[in-house]
Image (spheres, helix red, strand yellow):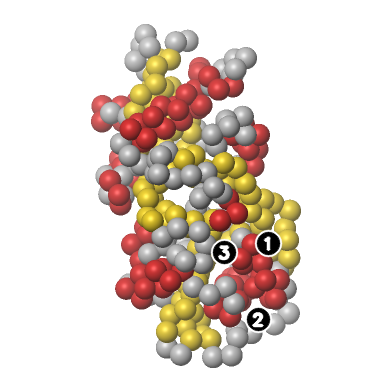
Amino acid sequence: MRLTYRMFEDDDFPGLQRLWEDATGWGGLSAEVWRRYSEDAPLGGMACAVAVERDSGKIVGQFAFIPSLVSVDGQVVRAFRPAAPIVGREARWAGLNPIRHPIAMMYATAVRALRDRGDGLIYMLPDPRWLRFFRMFPRLVCGSFPLWRMPLPLAAPLPLPAGYTAAPLSELDGRIDALWEAAARVHGCSVVRNAEALAWKTGDAAYDVLGVEHGGELVAVVTSRHKGDRQWLVCDVLFADAGEPLRAALAAACNLADERARAAPPERPIAKAAALVTPAMEPAARALGMERDRYDFPLVIDVLAPSLSREQVAPARWYVSAND
């Protein structure tokens, strides 16, 4: 089978729908879902590379790239997160050279297109089984972050530091923007988590969003949800101080997880609260009694812009969350 690779064109959508029906167990690709990510999404919508059978013109592969913004030492750059790589059954050949696999070729096609238009970088938190494959490409910067857990149910609710309160946030507004401006200085690199970005990330799933206040000031925000494998997953944690504000946010999320675990039906139990923990977060997690779990989140970065160095985006400098 001879394949060609290019970026998505509007006339390709029916072919993508057929590919989803034939090659995935995700269900059909609706026009509404496609519109959410390609047209209604912020930052101009996603990019998508496709693999096309040369003779028939049939689409046999897709690789989507979701846009976001990343702060690198205070400079905000446009970035993309790869998602939903699909290869049709007839094209799932590996060959002797893995870098010629359709997924690798679609990725390379997207990299050229995004670099040519001036985008900053690509980042991803792939399945750990992919890490060996990504390490074959010298230009990619690879690292990992541990998952930490809090077993549930709790013996008693975790106390928040004195003077701190936590409650659901009904609006994602300018207070979050102000908190983000301070939080961006905690880590060298971080996916932007202002009000608009958080509203988009939490808009298509059942997230709980908690705000942590001290003296009437919003000092932390934490999002979380029930996410597979008997766990309540702590996702975005927005904090400008890795001391008491972070500890209060993690405690509030674990207490919420405990409430959800006690109310969970027997067929969907929740046995732990879990969070991706960066080195800066470890003291707060440890102080609450959280412990290291048996899973690591890989982080892979591909630098596109000449103005960015590999050292600037080294994984140790990042804050990422489990839903990045």
Q: Position of residue 111 (x, y in %)?
A: 42, 32
Residue drawn at x 55%, y 37% is 140
- For the question of whether residue 20 can be seen, the reply is no
Label 1 with label 3: CB-CB less than 8 Å? no
Q: Is residue 224 above or below residue 28?
A: below
Task: Identify residue for label 3.
Answer: 234
Q: Classify mark 1: residues with Cα within 10 Å, few (<14), some (14-19) or many (20+).
A: many
Q: Position of residue 192 (x, y in %)?
A: 41, 59
Q: Give the spatial CA distance, label 1 vs label 3.
A: 10 Å
Of the numbered discs 2 and 1, the one sitting upstream in the chain is 1
Is residue 251 rendered to the left or right of residue 172? right
Q: Classify mark 3: residues with Cα within 10 Å, few (<14), some (14-19) or many (20+).
A: many
Q: Amino acid at mark 2?
A: Leu
Q: Give the spatial CA distance, label 2 vs label 3.
A: 15 Å
Q: Position of residue 142 (x, y in %)?
A: 60, 42
- For the question of whether residue 136 can be seen, the reply is yes
Q: Amino acid at mark 3?
A: Val
Residue drawn at x 60%, y 54% is 316
Task: Identify residue for label 1.
Answer: 148
Q: Amino acid at mark 1?
A: Trp
Of the numbered discs 1 and 3, the one sitting upstream in the chain is 1
